[in-house]
Image (cartoon, rainbow, N blue to C red):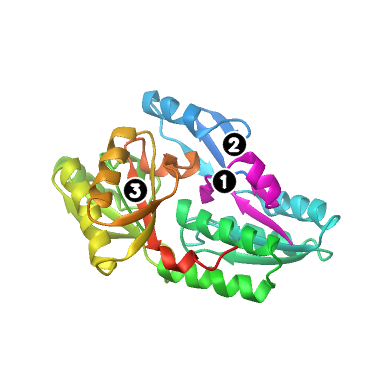
Amino acid sequence: MQIVTDSGTDLLVTDAQRKEWNIHTIPLVVTLEGKSYREGIDLKPEEFYPLLANSKELPVTSQPSAGDFAALYAKLAQTDPEILSIHISSGLSGTANSARAGAAMVPQAKVTVVDTLTLSAPSGWQVEAAARAARAGWSLDRILAKLAEISAATDVIYTLKELKYLIHGGRISHMKGLIASVLHIKPIIGVEKVRGTYVNHGQAQSFGHAIRGLADYVAKRVAPGTTLRAQVLHAFNPEGAQQLMEAVGSRFKCEWKPTGLLSLVLGAHVGPSMVGVVFAPASVFADLP
């Protein structure tokens, strides 16, 4: 079995691990100041965020085409036709639908498309789990059941300092965003599990208060004494990421996954100040090989 994913999944593993686990990543595209970049090929997050912070224009993003997926599936099917294709939420991107359309174009490939109904590291956790399980010889049905269990147990919450990127990307209404910007409100945002779209969990008057609000959200979702698998990502805000790790780590026993930069295509919609944490009971991952 081979694993396909997209660059919005934020799978923070080494290139050697990607090769060992048979993970193939198809890039999403960001356009900034008239130039288009394939994530991870033409531009990496650490190169993108300084450009974004200094740009007078706002970025535009696009998903891979069905043809892009079909070409990759056809190539992979020459080696192993069983492909598990795991992607960011169809409620926030057309990537999963492009994958389905691409699979229909390649009948020689046995493609199963998984819509994670989330994005970034929560999606990346599912990709990693699937790859590890597939390498250990798990059946497709067993892997899919495990991904559903991980999806149900995993949550993500984030905040940011400025709203213009969310407004530009159509993720929040212009009028609500304008009012919030004038009031300097810092939103606390999650991803709901039914349609995989953004949901507002509250707001704070300062970024520091918002960080504490994220930790409060975790406390409401997790039983006391639970050991967490947790991971902090940020869009170009290492100081905020450290504050968030300390706020969560002071209240829970955490098995921390590596902190890193958010996918640049996702970051294009939230801006360079964003920090967020993904978390789940560590016990959910205990049986993975």
Left or right position of 207 against 117: left
Does label 2 or label 3 sit earlier along the sequence?
A: 2
Q: Residue at label 1?
A: 7
Contact (Cβ within 8 Å) of mark 1 with mark 2: yes
Residues at marks 3 and 1, CA–CA distance in whole angstroms: 18 Å
Residue at 20% across / 58% down in the picture? Answer: 216
Q: Secondary structure at mark 2?
A: loop
Look at label 1 and name its amino acid. Answer: Ser
* Up-down relation of residue 60 to residue 175 (above or below): above
Residues at marks 2 and 3, CA–CA distance in whole angstroms: 21 Å
x and y percentages locating residue 246 in the rendered image = 26, 44
Tell me if residue 155 can be seen.
Answer: no
Specify few, some or many for label 2: CA neighbours under 10 Å numbering under 14, 14-19, or 20 or more: some
Q: How many marks?
A: 3
Q: Nearer the viewer, residue 144 or 188?
A: 144
In the image, the segment drawn in magenta is 1-25
* Up-down relation of residue 268 to residue 3 (above or below): above
Look at label 3 and name its amino acid. Answer: Gly
The answer to which quarter of the image holds residue 183 is: top left
Does label 1 or label 2 sit earlier along the sequence?
A: 1
Left or right position of 243 against 41: left
Does label 3 or label 1 sit earlier along the sequence?
A: 1
Look at label 2 and name its amino acid. Answer: Gly
Q: Residue at label 3?
A: 276
x and y percentages locating residue 162 in the rendered image = 27, 39
Magenta span includes 226: no
Contact (Cβ within 8 Å) of mark 2 with mark 3: no
Q: Secondary structure at mark 3?
A: strand
x and y percentages locating residue 86 in the rendered image = 60, 60
Residue 40 badge: 2
